[in-house]
Amino acid sequence: MMGNRSRLELGPLEQGPLERFDQDDWRALTDRVRQIAADIFAVPLDGLTAESSPESIASWDSLNHLSLVLALEQEWSIQFSPEEMEELLSIAKIVSVVAEKSLER
């Protein structure tokens, strides 16, 4: 289950500005990203791991990817560039990018 994973398993936090996130903040962010993704992709929350991607989630198609991006932007009042949208291809990457963007605000 995701709650037992360390921050390092979820993204590159060992260096840079993301190390400002403590374990509880990182877990809360990860849990919320997973919940949003589970809702959009209509999959059980337990079925989403840090490695979940379009290759492992059948319903992660281009339309649902756009829905995910829009939901993330709305949830955190952030905006992704087209390049960033293309990079959001795993739960771990999404959490990392959302964390970075939330620090920019």
Image (cartoon, rainbow, N blue to C red):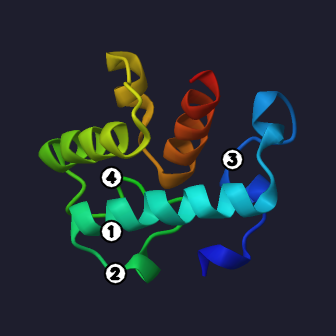
**Nearer to us in this view, 46 or 104:** 104
Looking at the image, do the residues carrying marks 2 and 1 touch, with CB atoms under 8 Å apart? yes
In the rendered structure, find residue 11 and report the number of the disc placed on it.
Answer: 3
Q: Tell me which corner region of the image, top left, top right, bottom left or bottom right, holds residue 72.
A: top left
Residue marked by disc 1: 38
* First in residue order: circle 3 vs circle 1: 3
**Residue placed under numbered mark 2 in the picture:** 44
Q: Are marks 1 and 4 in contact (CB under 8 Å)?
A: no
- Position of residue 87 in the picture relative to residue 5 (left or right): left
Disc 4 residue crowd, few under 14, some 14–19, many 20+, Cα 10 Å: some
Residue shown at 74% from the left, 41% from the top: 12
Q: Residue at x 26, y 67 (%)?
A: 39
Q: Residue 29 lies in what quarter of the image?
A: bottom right
Crowd band around label 1 with a 10 angstrom C-alpha radius: few (<14), some (14–19), many (20+): some
User: Identity of the amino acid at label 4?
Assistant: Pro
Give the mark, 2 or 4, whose residue is nearer the N terminus. Answer: 2
Disc on the earlier residue, 2 or 1: 1
Amino acid type indicated by mark 3: Gly
Q: Are marks 4 and 3 in contact (CB under 8 Å)?
A: no
Q: CA distance from mark 1 to mark 4?
A: 13 Å
Q: CA distance from mark 3 to mark 1?
A: 19 Å
- Mark 3–mark 2 CB contact (< 8 Å): no
Q: Mark 3 or 2 closer to N-term?
A: 3
Between the residue at mark 2 and the residue at mark 1, the CA separation in whole angstroms equals 6 Å
Q: Find residue 54 and name its label.
A: 4
Please tell me whether mark 2 or mark 4 is closer to you in this view: 2
Query: Looking at numbered disc 2 in the image, what kind of residue is underneath it?
Result: Pro
